[in-house]
Image (cartoon, grey):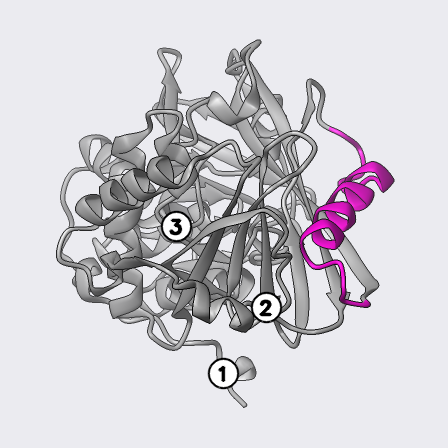
Amino acid sequence: MSSNSYDLAIIGAGINGVGIAECAAAAGYRVLVIERKGVGSETSCRSSKLIHGGLRYLESGQIGLVKKALRARRTLLKIAPDLVHPVPFVFPVYQHSKRAPWILGTGLALYGVLAGLDPLAKFRRVAETEWDQLDGLMFDDLAAVFQYWDAQTDDQLLTRSVMESAQRCGAELLCPVAVEKVTFKQNRYQITMDSGEQLETSVVVNSAGPWVNEVLACVVPEVKPVPIHWVQGAHIELTGPVPKQIYYLESPGDGRVVFVMPWQDRIMVGTTETQYEQLPEHIEATPQEVDYLLNVYRHYFPLHKVSLVSSWAGLRVLPAMNDNPFSRPRDTWLQSSPNHPNMLNVYGGKLTTYRDTAIRAVKWCRSRLGLRPEVADYQTLKLVPPEDAIS
């Protein structure tokens, strides 16, 4: 650390934490990011690697989130062309599918309208004469095939690139180090780390992802945490014929959406939704999740011989409710408490919409800290891959 006094200390260097750091540093604030393991080393490297509007969220009525995500997709394609790439998606509809062709066509039309003038707003119905180009997809009872566009990224590289952009704007990174105690006293926070180091800051942003309430347990005076559930999303990697595009599939067992996609010369399949009411000690794909994803792949690509290479899982934070996880809001929500007016807690969120979260969080910080001379225009800051990732 170049100082032990900051305007803003951010706990957690996942995509939301580094996004807030970049936006705040560009706005001229003295920013420190505290990370216990590595930048983008937890949930932010265990996603489906997609920058997308969330077509499936239209079904649960989250139109505002879809519109926001589509706007974010357009921005990231512009400011990070070396990190975010357009990719075609294929959505097959079978006689037994939950979504009839006309329903899917209507949904894609709405998706296109929400995308506005974005070149990726286009979609089409794939002619039957082209079905033999669908990477060996099962044809039995196939009624229709649609193709639309979204984008793909390397989630950890994107997170690291955002952190490096924040550092170019003046933000600092303290890693690896864990927070042991956060004390609010005389309108300032004192943060004590497991290394013995201490610092003071005017504002704290708790962006610890699945561990957000674990951080709150270290805060004095006590903060009442928001009730949450943890929903695990697992993925598997397979060797075998790598698809040329991403397949948007319905699980034959429960109708859930599962993606089959190309990823670094392998096949990636995901994801699941396994709910936990307590934070699990070990975050890893369960044997049941692995079998579930393998069965989906083998159902739709029965002629392919594949081998399991690896599996992994990440945790989503969702509001604690009794309904199906799929129907719950997927947007980020920001929370503060009356006895901690200068501490912001970040819950949930999507990789795609991290910039919107950052702008909202920095607006909140500005109301506590006042204005500073800008270092850079956040809206036009370009993102480039880390030097060690450039071949």
Query: Looking at the rendered structure, which numbered label has been put on residue 289?
Result: none
Is 67 magenta? The answer is: no
Give the secondary structure at mark 1.
helix
Q: Is residue 185 visible?
A: yes
Left or right side of 161 for 106? left
Can you say whether 90 is above or below 341 in the image? below
Q: Residues within 10 Å of mark 2 (few under 14, many from 20)?
A: many
Q: Find the magenta span and give its range.
A: 280-305
Q: Earlier in the sequence, mark 1 or mark 2?
A: 2
Give the secondary structure at mark 2.
strand
Q: Observer-nearest residue: 103 or 349?
A: 103
* Place of residue 336 in the rendered image (x, y in percent of width and height, measured from the top left): 37, 20
Is 282 magenta? The answer is: yes
Q: Residues within 10 Å of mark 3 (few under 14, many from 20)?
A: many
- Identify which residue is drawn at 54% across, 19% down: 220
Q: Is residue 163 visible?
A: no
The residue labelled by disc 1 is: 387
Q: Earlier in the sequence, mark 1 or mark 3?
A: 3
The residue labelled by disc 2 is: 262
